[in-house]
Amino acid sequence: MATPPVLPQLPTSFEANPPPMGPTPPQQPPGTDMTGICFRDQLWLNTYPLDRNLVFDYFALSPFYDWTCNNEQLRSQSIHPLDLSHLLKMTGTEYMLSEVMEPHLFVFRKQKRDSAEKVTPMLTYYVLDGSIYQAPQLCSVFAARVGRALYYISKAFGTAASKLEKIGYVDSENEGAASESKTGKEVIDFKEVKRIDHILASLQRKLPPAPPPPSFPEGYVPQPTTEDEKGPETQQGGEPQLPTVDPIIDQGPAKRMKF
């Protein structure tokens, strides 16, 4: 009886840590946010080199790995899981190694293949220095950046508002002090008034005497005063006496003569 031929073992297959037996744990559906999870197996990293040939076996140990993908079917057939010649002939979910910077960075793209030319990207994962992460989606990145920008903008407005309140408080204090100074200045200084009166009096003494009043016009008859009514005998010969005051200047406009 002939024995069936044994398929050659590829150097990329990893048999030291086979997939766990029993029911496969439920996987997260595509689009599920697992950005808060980080996977790292230090024992595996200490045992095997992390290069493009073994990195997929290391990635298959993480909770990000989908056991129903096409790559897992190739692994079960002892074919390299990243063999593009076989993946192009299959349809369904698969992982592709898009970027490699050995031994620090490996980027896996999870995508849905409908044909050899048509694929739909789903999620992106990366292995950075032995730690596996899920890359956030673009909308999540924008939301986080916008939220951070809004936080700093609101903080800046709060700081500016607090400074403006302080400036307004100082201005109110300055206005109060100015009003107090104005009220202090408005108070009458009697010493200053007396000094000004003294200066005006000295100037008045230095000025020449006022000229005599003008003569009365012809036909002007002065009105009798109370003194004339009480003492008519004081008048001499009926001659009109000149008043002691100027009737035009000192008696006001109401008693001026009308022409």
Image: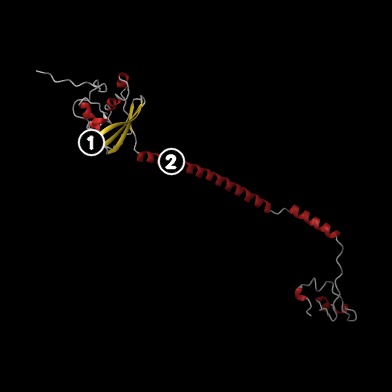
Residue occupied by mark 1: 92
Q: Nearer the viewer, residue 128 or 100?
A: 100
Q: Secondary structure at mark 1?
A: strand
**Amino acid on which the number 2 mark rests in the picture:** Ala
Residue 96: % across, % down = 29, 32
* Colour logic: secondary structure
At label 2, counting other C-alpha atoms closer than 10 Å, the crowd grade (few under 14, some 14-19, many 20 or more) is: few
Q: Secondary structure at mark 2?
A: helix
Q: Nearer the viewer, residue 148 or 200?
A: 148
Q: Mark 1 and 2 residues: CB-CB less than 8 Å, in contact?
A: no
Distance CA(mark 1)–CA(mark 2): 40 Å
Residue 131 at least partly seen = yes
At label 1, counting other C-alpha atoms closer than 10 Å, the crowd grade (few under 14, some 14-19, many 20 or more) is: some
Residue occupied by mark 2: 149
| Callout in the foreground (1, 2) | 1
Can you say whether 139 is above or below 49 in the image? below
Q: In the figure, is residue 108 to the left or right of 154?
A: left
Residue 81: % across, % down = 25, 28
Q: Nearer the viewer, residue 77 or 4?
A: 4
Q: Residue 92's quadrant in the figure?
A: top left
Q: Identify the disc placed on residue 69.
A: none
Q: In the figure, is residue 144 to the left or right of 258?
A: left
Residue 21: % across, % down = 19, 25
**Amino acid on which the number 1 mark rests in the picture:** Gly
Q: In the figure, is residue 205 to the left or right of 45?
A: right
The residue depicted at 83 percent of the width and 58 percent of the height is 203
Image quarter (top left, top right, bottom left or bottom right) of the C terminus: bottom right
Of the image marks 1 and 2, the number of the one nearer the N terminus: 1
The residue depicted at 30 percent of the width and 25 percent of the height is 55
Residue 131: % across, % down = 34, 27
Q: Nearer the viewer, residue 194 or 172?
A: 172
